[in-house]
Image (cartoon, grey):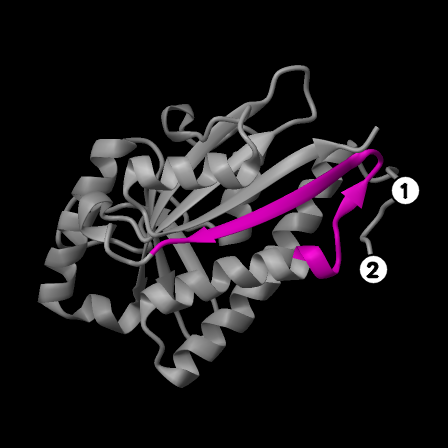
């Protein structure tokens, strides 16, 4: 089943991204609840989440007035995390213009209860520092809770503030939708949009040293 709209509620790109955000956040809630119940490790949960985002859009495509979302996922053996500090690379490309726009984001995931341990907070500080060396503006921490995930900037200290007065946590769907609005995302770590998606994603992951990658492209069907 393809999600479509008649365009009366706003510009087609905004309707597309709203539908994408809602779909992703629904999947995130399911994955987070399963991970909590089964006590899954963060790296396994992150990989499963990327796969389920791809699967749900493959099963029920999102296409609105000549625009559609395409998703691709790749995975390496998890040996490179110590290099980058990240366990997921998010690649976002807009192909609905004359010249494609490509950006990237780096993500480290943690379970909420793990952050109560001082050793895990110190580990996160080191991981965040490595991510920020690759992208100062778009390195993120995803915190898995009982039935959802919140997204905040990668912390600079070993005492991360998950909910603070200087910013409000985002949902993962909101982060990705804003990336595709070109409001978030780092051009310096975007994949080469002229390469085939799989090759471009793998090359970017290898260059950055990230074991999991998900690519989300907005393309024109006209």
Q: Which of marks 2 and 1 precedes in the sequence?
A: 2
Kindly identify the residue that appears in the image at 83 percent across and 60 percent down.
Answer: 1
Kindly identify the residue that appears in the image at 57 percent across and 42 percent down.
Answer: 216
Of labels 1 and 2, the one closer to you = 2
173 up-or-down from 185: above or below = below
Identify which residue, 7 or 2, lies in the foreground: 2
The secondary structure type at the circle numbered 2 is loop
Numbered circles on residues, count: 2
Indicate which disc residue 1 carries: 2
**Taking 68 as reference, is 88 left or right?**
left
Q: Which residue is mark 1?
A: 6
Please identify the quarter of the rendering in which residue 160 is found. bottom left
Kindly identify the residue that appears in the image at 19 percent across and 70 percent down.
Answer: 116
Indicate which disc residue 142 carries: none
Q: CA distance from mark 1 to mark 2?
A: 16 Å
38 up-or-down from 104: above or below = below
Please identify the quarter of the rendering in which residue 162 is found. bottom left
Quadrant that contains the C terminus: top right
x, y percent for residue 164: 31, 50
Q: Is residue 84 magenta?
A: no
Which span is picked out in magenta?
Answer: 57-76
> Farthest top residue?
98
x, y percent for residue 95: 65, 27
């Amino acid at each position: 089943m393809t999600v479509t709209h008649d365009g009366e509620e706003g510009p087609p790109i905004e309707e597309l991204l709203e539908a994408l955000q809602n779909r992703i956040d629904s999947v995130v809630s399911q994955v987070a609840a399963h991970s909590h119940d089964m006590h899954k490790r963060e790296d396994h949960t992150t990989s499963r989440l990327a796969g389920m985002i791809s699967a749900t859009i493959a099963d029920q495509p999102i296409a609105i007035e000549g625009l559609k979302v395409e998703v691709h996922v790749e995975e390496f053996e998890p040996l490179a995390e110590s290099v980058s500090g990240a366990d997921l690379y998010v690649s976002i490309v807009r192909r609905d213009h004359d010249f494609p726009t490509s950006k990237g984001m780096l993500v480290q995931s943690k379970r909420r209860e793990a952050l109560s341990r001082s050793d895990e907070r110190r580990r996160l500080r080191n991981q965040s520092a490595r991510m920020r060396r690759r992208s100062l503006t778009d390195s993120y921490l995803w915190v898995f809770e009982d039935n959802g995930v919140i997204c905040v900037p990668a912390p600079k200290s070993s005492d991360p503030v998950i909910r603070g007065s200087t910013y409000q946590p985002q949902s993962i769907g909101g982060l990705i939708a804003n990336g595709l609005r070109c409001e978030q995302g780092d051009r310096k770590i975007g994949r080469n949009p002229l390469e085939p998606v799989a090759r471009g994603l793998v090359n970017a992951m290898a260059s950055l040293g990230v074991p999991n990658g998900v690519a989300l492209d907005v393309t024109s069907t006209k």
